Image (spheres, rainbow, N blue to C red):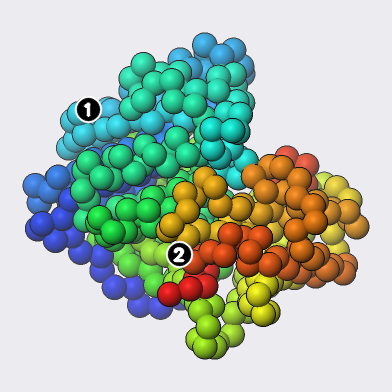
Amino acid sequence: MSISASPAMPDLRLAPNDRILIFAPHPDDETIATGGVIQQAVAMGLPIRLVYLTYGDNAETAFIAYRKRPVVRSKSVQGMGLTRHDEAVAAADVLGLSPDQLTFLGYPDFRTLKIWTDHWGTDAAPCESMFTRTSSVPYASAFRPGAPYRADEILADLKTIIGDFQPTVIFTAHPGDHNPDHLSLYLLTRVALWDLAGKLQPVPWPYLVHHPEWPEPVGYHPELALRPPDRLAHEINWHTLPVSLERAKVKHQAVQCHQTQLKFDRDYLDSFMRTNELFGDFAEVDLRPNRGGDNSVSAGEPVVSSKLRHSERVKFVGIMDRSIHIEGDRAVFAVTFSRPLAKITVASIYMFGYRPDVPFSEMPKLRLDISGVEHAVLDGGKWVRDSGIKVEHSLTKLAFSAPLAALGDPKWVLGSARTQMGAVPMDWIAWRVIRLQD
C-alpha cells in the first residue's frame, strides 16, 4: 500500500491553560500514538492524565510470543494483564508521568466492541471475557473493581473521569481504526462528550493506530514523517504534532518497556517513531433538513491485509462506496461491495441513534447482518421484527432502510459497515457521525 501525497497538515498546538486527558484502548497505545504529546505536556507543566480502557490481557498472539506457549488459563491471562499494567507504568515514567496520573478501567481486551453493540442497560447480561472468563472487572488496582462488563458501565466511568478532571483536550482512539477496542473507545468517548456537552466541551483529537498496511515504511525511521494512509488521507482534516529527534528517542525508550508487545511485533511499534504524531477526525455528515449536498462517499480502494491467508485473500469482499440519506421519514444506508457476497461472508451495517433527552442505553442500536440471500436485523443483539425496516440487495449492493422512529427519532446517528469471513475481519469502513436535527 502506498502513502499518497496528503494535503498540507496544520500543526496541533497545546495551550498554556490546557488540561490533557489521554484515553488508550491498551497499554502501549498511549506511547506509540501520544508519546510526543505527553512529553510536550510535561515540559509545559500541564495537568495530564492517562486512562486505559483495558489491561491488554487478551492479546493472545503477543502472549504466545512472550511466553513461548499459549496462555489460556484465566489466572494466567489476568497475570499477563498485570504485566502489561506494569509495563504501562514503566513507560509512563520514561515519558515523565507518575503512577498516580494513570487510571486503568479493566474492561475486557478484544471484547469492548461487542459490549458496545450488544450489552447495554441493566436488563442485559454482562459480556464474558474471551480468556479471563470473567463478566466484571477482576483487577483490584482498577478504577472500579467488580464493574459489570456492560457498555453503560464503561460510559459512566468515562463521564466520571471527564467530569472530575475537566480536560480542555482529549486524545482518544480513531473511528477509522481496525481494532475493535479502539473503535469502541472512540464511540463511547463521543457519546460521553455529547452527554456532557452542557457542562464542558473539551476538544477531541482521535489518533490512528491500526490500519491495514500502515504505517509505511515499516520499522524504526525517526527521520521520516508519519503520513495518513491513502484511504483516510483526504477525508480527514489531519493535524500534526511535531516530535523532535530527542523526544523521538525518549518515546522509543518508553516503547522498550512494553516487552510483551515488542516480542510480537517490534517493527510495527517502531514504525510510530517519527518526526510527528497524527490527529484528526471526520467531519459530521450533515443531513439536517434543507442542507442539501451529496452524501455518497467513496470508501476508498479496499486494502487486503497481508496478514490474511491466501484462501482468505482470494475470497476477500471489500466495501467500495457507501451513502447515507433521508427519504421522507426514513434513513437509508447503502453500500457497494467489491465482489458478490458468498455464504461464508457476512456483511453488517450499523445505525445507532442518539438524542440528548434519552439515556443512550435506551436508544435503538440497529445492526443488519447479511450473508448470501439471508439477513437478520438486530437491536442490541436481539432480533427485530415488524419495525418497518426494509432491506434490498443484489449481488454487490445493499440498502438498509429504517424509519427514523425505529432509530429513536435521533439527533445524531452513528453508522458504519463491515465485512468478515467467520471470525476473520475483511473490510471495515470508519464509523461516521450523521447529524439529523439542530
| Image spot of residue 367 (x, y percent) | 69, 53
Residue corresponding to mark 2: 228
Point 18% across, 60% down: residue: 14
Label 2 secondary element? loop
Q: Nearer the viewer, residue 256 or 437?
A: 437
Q: Is residue 44 left or right of residue 418?
A: left
| Image spot of residue 92 (x, y percent) | 25, 34
Q: Nearer the viewer, residue 215 or 219?
A: 215
- Residue 122's disc is none
Q: Is residue 57 above or below residue 191?
A: above
| Image spot of residue 109 (x, y percent) | 52, 32
Q: Nearer the viewer, residue 266 or 48?
A: 48
Q: Nearer the viewer, residue 138 or 171?
A: 138
Point 37% across, 37% down: residue: 157
Q: Using a 10 Å C-alpha cutoff, classify the residue at mark 1 as few (fewer than 14 neighbours), some (14 to 19) or many (20 or more).
A: some
Q: Is residue 372 above or below residue 12?
A: above
Disc with the residue nearer the chain's start (2 vs 1): 1
Q: Is residue 315 left or right of residue 233?
A: right
Residue corresponding to mark 1: 99
Q: Nearer the viewer, mark 2 or mark 1?
A: 1
Question: As shown in the figure, which amino acid type bears the numbered disc 2?
Answer: Pro
